[in-house]
Amino acid sequence: MQTKRLLLALGLLLALFGILAAIVALIPSIREIGNMKGRLSDVLPKAGSPDAGRVGDIGKFGSEEEFRSYLVAARAAQSSGFGMGGRMGGDVMTLDAATPETSVKSTATPERFSETNVQVAGIDEPDIVKTDGSTIYFSREPDYRILDSPVMEKRAADTEASLLAPGESGTVPAYVPTGRTDIISAVPAEAMSKVASLGRSGEMLLFGDTLVVFDLSRRDIAAFDISDKANPKEKWVLRQTDGTELLAARKYGDTLYLVEKTWVNESSPCPITPFSVGAEKLSIACVDIYRPAVPSFVDAVFAAVAVDPKTGAAKAKTSFVGSSGQSTVYMSENAVYATFPEAGDPMGYILGFFRGNRDLLPEGIFERLEKLAGYDIGQDAKMTEFSRIMEQALFSRDADDRLRFQSEVQNRMTDYAKTHLRELGSTGIAKLSLSDLSLAAEGSVPGYLLNQFSLDEYDGRLRVATTVGGRQSFGFGWVNSDASANDVYVLDADLDREGRLLDLGQGERIYAARFIGETGYLVTFKETDPFYVLDLSDPDKPRLAGELKIPGYSSYLHPLGDDLILGVGKEDDKVKLSLFDVSSPDEPREVSKYVLDEYWSEAMQNHHAFLADPAHDIFFIPGYQGGYAFSHEGNELSLAKAAKGDRIKRALFIDDVFYIVSEDAAYAYDIDTWGKKGELGL
């Protein structure tokens, strides 16, 4: 009987905690204050206030011991059972295309050529295809071969990049990357030829006569002198240390900007050595690492580094702690913005619920919870004591009352979550000055970001689009997926909040965001695609100008002129292109749409795969079956060219020649007639 009673109580407790955890897990992160001394109001704005400005101050660690203590406090917040779900972005930082140069085989300087599709004009992003107007650089996906021991050992000695795997029969085979970057003379199109190949593959950036290849299969970055296209020479190699990976790279002017992630070694967290160039190691001391005042979940140190592309030497650096899955990086012409999760106070959130529902608990139990919330103990200890108090509260009830209690908590907690979505989940933002990467400002917004397009700097202000709530909890069997909404915040130069627009798309999450001048565009989705047009002309009072609901959703938005926005997404499990007329912001219209017989396009998730040619009113996206060039002349979508091929990756143009590049070949077409001008097998 006693065993049965304990099992029943345990089941009820799990149900209760499942409900509470599921609701709190709708929020991306929670403030861990149990190990922080002083009053919460000394460090944080009032919980739940959408107008609350900064959350704590970002400072630097004073010593390695302080770093260790911070990790202990952050781990306590994570292990309390409230998830810290989210993303660190992997978003590649943005950049404009390279300065045009004439190939040694070119007969004339091109009047125009395409650049990598980027978020911010003048700031380039790495991609697998680049052109300088006469030459195409195409990096193929790496293959992996199993080599026997002697060959493997030689390859390892030559490249220091073999990937070892368990062997059989006394051999130790290795999976070795066999990537390749082809250098293609593209002009004239009728005489395309491959002039050289590099034994590396990955996304690239061009700095004049220097080609930088981000060879992630070998975990290094290599720079090549390509002044002689037929004989490229390696200039320097930046080798990442164990536990470090590249998250973002950007080119601005003559500087290469990198963001590296290094996993934290809790027993010896610093110094951090993310990479080396030759014999020179980049070393980051504890006292050079920024951290939020309030401990958040930390498993990595991020280093933003300005690199000289000619030598690979670091010119400036800044480091900060964060979570490997919850940060986004955005770069403007003035600053680098890095986001990180900010943890919250689960005990305070739960107590707030019971303060508004005192009839659910006996007065004595409620007073014990109030007292517990004020204890200066770790979050784990608080939650353990909370479990014990609630167990006693359940034992004091009969079976009928326990069932009623469980139902009432679930029902009321659902309503509570809908009105308290912004109390716990927030995203901290660090602003780094582009001149020297010093910390210029820090701020915070409720909710979490989708990707780099959720951030945009305009006229000295930062606009941020976030989703609050909507985070699912796994393992408890109950999720309130409707408890979500979407906000847009305008922050001033000090990252203090100026204006806000709340509760867009309730019960949905953001699928796409784009800010263009004084206008913002947002797509949320659950069953239909609300396309929102936002008027941001008054930073203090951003407003919803117009809204359009159509089937499906868009996951990438691209401007095609002043009054047209293209959405690339899906409808009924097929790729859909939607052309929106936003000439009247209060009444956006879908003026044309095209549904492709494709279930996926890389352009839906990777804007580098998208190409627009404004001079001819065409754009290109790849699919699984081939590549597609569309015309939007006269505000009408029409398929101008379909190129069959399941390995098509990118398109580009040089003057009026349109090139489509696949893993197997490069094709050249006349843009006006779409007649084939040339073909080169790869």
Image (spheres, rainbow, N blue to C red):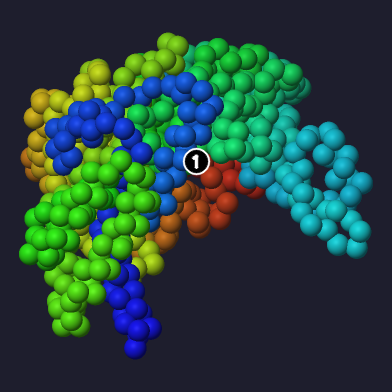
Q: Is residue 479 above or below residue 431?
A: below
* Front residue of this view, candidates 237 and 314: 314
Residue 218 shows up from this direction: yes
How many neighbours does mark 1 have within 10 angstroms: few (below 14), some (14-19), or many (20 or more)? Answer: some
* Front residue of this view, candidates 575 and 53: 53
User: Residue 658, percent across and down?
Assistant: 49, 36
User: Mark 1 highlights which residue?
Assistant: 299
Left or right of 40 in this view: 640? right
Q: Give the quadrant of the C terminus.
A: top right
Residue 585 shows up from this direction: no
Left or right of 302 in this view: 339? left
Element under disc 1: loop
Q: Quadrant of residue 34?
A: top left
Left or right of 252 in this view: 494? left
Q: Is residue 594 above or below residue 157?
A: below
Q: How many marks do you count on the picture?
A: 1
Q: Quadrant of residue 535?
A: top left
User: Residue 491, percent across and down?
Assistant: 21, 26
As shown in the figure, which amino acid type bears the numbered disc 1?
A: Asp
Left or right of 225 in this view: 467? left
Q: Is residue 344 above or below residue 474?
A: above
User: Residue 368, percent across and down?
Assistant: 20, 55
Q: Residue at x 67, y 20 (%)?
A: 281
Q: Residue at x 32, y 82 (%)?
A: 5
